[in-house]
Amino acid sequence: MKEPTWVLRDVAAAVQQMLLSEHGGLSGIRDEALLDSALFRPQNLFAYRESVSIFDLAASYSYGLALNHPFIDGNKRVALTVSAIFLEINGYSLNATEAEAVITFEHLASGKLTEKQLSAWFHDFTQHS
């Protein structure tokens, strides 16, 4: 697999602002280091794991953003949206319904869903564009 296009920090911050303007919540970054950690997780996975899929990398973004809680509010929504953007800029479209996504990301945040299971979910609900 060639190196994918990564989601920039400014994009993740803009996503949080956009989502909060639509759905409400408190704006801002709670912990800069946790945001950086979440955004570099997939790059680290790509660099050091022998075999990795685009779905593993999307799951890594989601896992880091949802569980690190780098933003004051909207972490699960940001996690889903950043992963969808990552897939989109790399030639894939996420096709899950809003209800499926909400349930999945609630399970992720509560520890009922592993990163590996989330990767499989992305695989099942994503099409190559």
Image: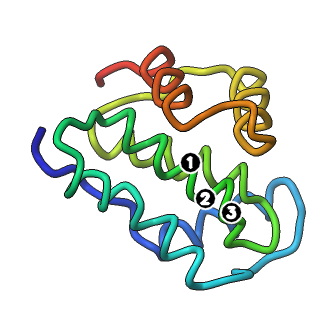
Q: Quadrant of residue 97?
A: top right
Of all residues shown, which one is farthest toward the bottom?
Answer: 32
Residue named by callout 3: 18
Protein image colouring: rainbow
Say above or below: 5 vs 71.
above
Q: Callout 3: helix, strand or loop?
A: helix
Q: Which residue is at the front of the view, 110 or 85?
A: 110
Check if mark 2's residue and mark 1's residue have beta carbons within 8 Å.
yes
Q: In the image shown, does 115 or 98 lie closer to the viewer?
A: 115
Instruction: Work out whether 23 lies above or below 95.
Output: below
Reading the image, the residue beneath label 1 is 62
What numbered label is drawn on residue 65? 2
The image position of residue 53, as x and y in percent, is 28, 33
Residue drawn at the location 17% of the way across and 42% of the way down: 50
Could you tell which of marks 1 and 3 lies nearer the N-terminus? 3
Amino acid type, mark 1: Ser
The residue under the point 37% across, 44% down is 57
Image vertical order of residue 103 relative to residue 28, above or below? above
